[in-house]
Image (tube, rainbow, N blue to C red):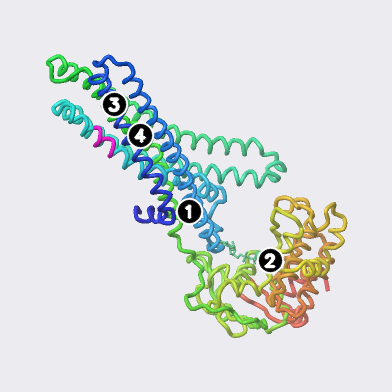
Amino acid sequence: MLKKFFSYYVPYKKLFAIDFICAVISAILELFFPIAVNMVIDQILPQGNLRHIVMFSVLLFALYLFNTTMNYIVVYIGHVFGSHIETDMRKELFEHFQKQSYAYFDKMKTGDLMSRITTDLFEISELAHHGPEDVFITIMTLVGAFLLMLNVHIPLALMTVALIPILGVVLGLFSRYMVNINVSIKQNLGRFNAGIQNSISGMRVVKAFANESYENNIFVDLAEKYRLAMVRFYNSMATSSSFNYIVMRLINLFALLAGSYYTIVGELTIGELVGYILLSNVFIRPLERINAMLEVYPKGYAGFVRLQEELNKEPDIVDHPNAVEAPKFEGNIRYDNVSFGYNKEKPVLENVTIDIKAGQTVAFVGPSGAGKTTLVNLLPRFYEITSGQITVDGVDIQDVTMQSLRKQIGIVQQDVFLFDGTIKENVLYGRLDATDEEVEAAIDSAKLREVISNLPDGIDTQIGERGVSLSGGQKQRLSIARIFLKNPKILILDEATSALDTATERFIQSSLDELSQGRTSLVIAHRLATITNADRIIVVTPEGIMEDGTHEELLAQNNIYADLYRSQFGGM
Ligand code: ADP
Ligand code: MG
């Protein structure tokens, strides 16, 4: 874990070195000041010459100024260094998220993920910036002050220092406890953020059901749990800081008492006594630092543990080591004995075999929950099959890169997700390097022109988060424009028009028919009217594929499809 942690330092060795060296110089200078006071009292003061004292003060002032500069560098460069590490980790984490499969995002909660990538990483960077520096300076100052104290009076110094190991043991135990508390704070914060995200993104539903007070209660509950976790943390912070304080003051007091004794018996001069008391102050200052570390260290460490835990999760669907760029598809698709389940206990598809010729339109119909969406989602490898094989033009989809596979598959779903931004940006998402003319052509093909001409800023109109300012049909047309622009060889339409009214459906259907031209299309349809002229219709039921044929053939079989058809169109 430590090795991994320091690997983030490597690109910023220089910044860290500057920060570190300045911090060390500054700590050494702090050691020097008590000696200076000792000198003033014992050597310069007895001379009775004010000029010497003034000169000495000027010298000290110069040193203070120098130390101020050091301090500036430590604070500024240290944070620049920390911010680099924070950003690097953030990039790594974001890339990690991008690599994950559908299954990962089925389980994860947006708010939790947000808190990992924001709060956690900030706290880790604080640790990266302060951690090693503080540890080193603490040890150095303790040792340095101790040596100087020894130089003043050996038995006195030894007695003073005897108090330290006790403090060390107590604080060591404490810091372990604090890491645990911080892991729990982070889990609570994650749940809290996930709760807010859930509730805010569902605000329209909340209002529709007038369930604001219910949502408020959930929120208050989560906020309260988070607060309690923090209270536990601050309780232990307060305990450790009080404990620290009393130990520090004991050391001070002891220096005064025992030091006075040695002064009275003539073993110490007044200057040495004052210098020693000031030294004991320098000596205990790192103890204050340790207390600050007790806040930074457990938070950062807990965050780093969570970060590593996350980064160590291997994406469950990856390119095979010798995957190649997929050739340009013609569009022959074959499912060969394919089985799949979201979990081991309950298979959704078992030994499914389907053969689809390039250019065909194949419709999948059947009851909800039968596995139609699951079936088509296996083709772009959104989920990985458990056994069997899926090929396109005879090439196993697992032998090509996911990028090159997915670039050649276009998917239109029932829920369209649009990004916050303009219409143009959303269409461009289909193929980022498309020209303006291509975007315009896609807009025409998707019959989006009329929608755009009624908008204030035309194609540059902002459509709001998830495209809230567009109607269902308009959103669907936009998503179709995206696919026209992408121009894939294989098309998947998963209940693309199910959420629309019949008039809009008919209108969109004509765009979809046009989109299907020259492509292999897998169409999942709820309303059978849209698929009666498909080349083939496959009936999927929870028991598997039950029927396969043209509309006329299946009607003639007078079985499941025929029943479905009659239930939608009545009589016959
Ligand atoms: P259809 O599209 O035919 O309505 P689905 O393919 O969506 O059916 O679902 C088939 C089965 O798989 C259902 O029992 C459903 O509950 C389950 N299922 C669908 N998606 C997931 C998922 N992401 N995780 C776990 N189970 C799922
Ligand atoms: Mg479905």
Q: Earlier in the sequence, mark 4 or mark 1?
A: 1
Q: Pick whichever of labels 2 and 1 is earlier in the sequence.
A: 1
Report which residue position mark 4 lands on. Answer: 289
Image quadrant containing the N terminus: bottom left
Q: Is residue 13 above or below residue 429?
A: above
Mark-to-mark CA distance, 2 and 1: 27 Å
Measured in 3D between alpha carbons, the distance from the residue under mark 2 to the one under mark 4, in whole angstroms, is 52 Å
Quarter of the rendering containing residue 407 = bottom right
Amino acid tagged 2: Leu
The residue at which mark 2 appears reads as 432
Disc nearer the start of the sequence (2/3):
3
Mark 3 — residue?
36
Comparing marks 4 and 1, which lies closer to the viewer?
A: 4
Q: Earlier in the sequence, mark 4 or mark 3?
A: 3
Location of ligand 2 given as a quarter of the image: bottom right
Residue 22, horizontal then vertical, whole percent: 38, 41
- Is mark 1 in CB contact (under 8 Å) with mark 3? no
Magenta segment: does it hold 144? yes
Vertical comparison of 529 with 253: above or below: below
- Going by the numbered disc 4, the residue's amino acid type is Arg
